Amino acid sequence: MQFCDDCGSMMHKQGEEMVCSSCGAVEESEADGGFVETAAQDTSDVIETSEDANFEGKPTAEETCPECGHDTAWYTIKQTGSADEPPTRFFKCKDCGARWRDYS
């Protein structure tokens, strides 16, 4: 990746030159012209949060279900507010499948 010396914006390759996406400045390409490929994404650490998600194997917490009273639930954590607020924890009862959230 190459950045413009004039304005700092990212440049894109156009023929054998690098052209600034913002100011149009043209520079010689610093790279050898090859592309870097990344490895395929491993989805083993993705936590499902859709209504029909299969939560087996996800982390659990000792939380009491408001529907059936069961004491263990799967959970996920997401930052739903601004960065200075605590994250929201989403729970799914291991027994009845009820869902609820905790704002800490």
Image (cartoon, rainbow, N blue to C red):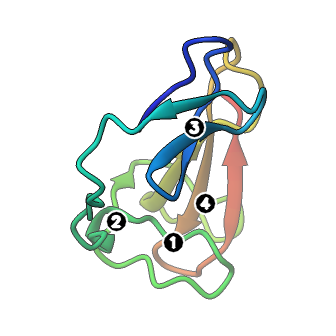
Residue at image position (51%, 59%) is 15
The foreground one among 3 and 56 is 3
- Mark 2 or 1 closer to N-term? 1
- Mark 2 or 3 closer to N-term? 3
The foreground one among 40 and 60 is 40
Disc 2/disc 3 C-alpha distance (Å): 42 Å
From the image, which quarter does the N terminus lie in?
Answer: top left
Residue at image position (48%, 56%) is 75
Check disc 3 and report the residue beneath it: 11
Disc 3/disc 4 C-alpha distance (Å): 53 Å
**SS class of the residue under badge 2?**
loop
Instruction: Name which quarter of the figure residue 51 lies in.
Output: bottom right
Identity, as a three-letter code, of the amino acid under mark 2: Lys
Residue at image position (26%, 62%) is 38
From the image, which quarter does the C terminus lie in?
Answer: top right
Identity, as a three-letter code, of the amino acid under mark 1: Glu
Identity, as a three-letter code, of the amino acid under mark 4: Cys
Which is closer to the viewer, label 3 or label 4? 3
Q: Which mark is residue 48?
A: 1
Disc 1/disc 4 C-alpha distance (Å): 19 Å
Check disc 2 and report the residue beneath it: 58
Residue 72 point in image, percent of width and height? 42, 60
Residue 44 point in image, percent of width and height? 27, 71
Check disc 4 and report the residue beneath it: 65
Assess disc 3: are there few (<14), some (14-19) or many (≥20) residues with their C-alpha within 10 Å of its C-alpha. Answer: many
The foreground one among 84 and 92 is 84
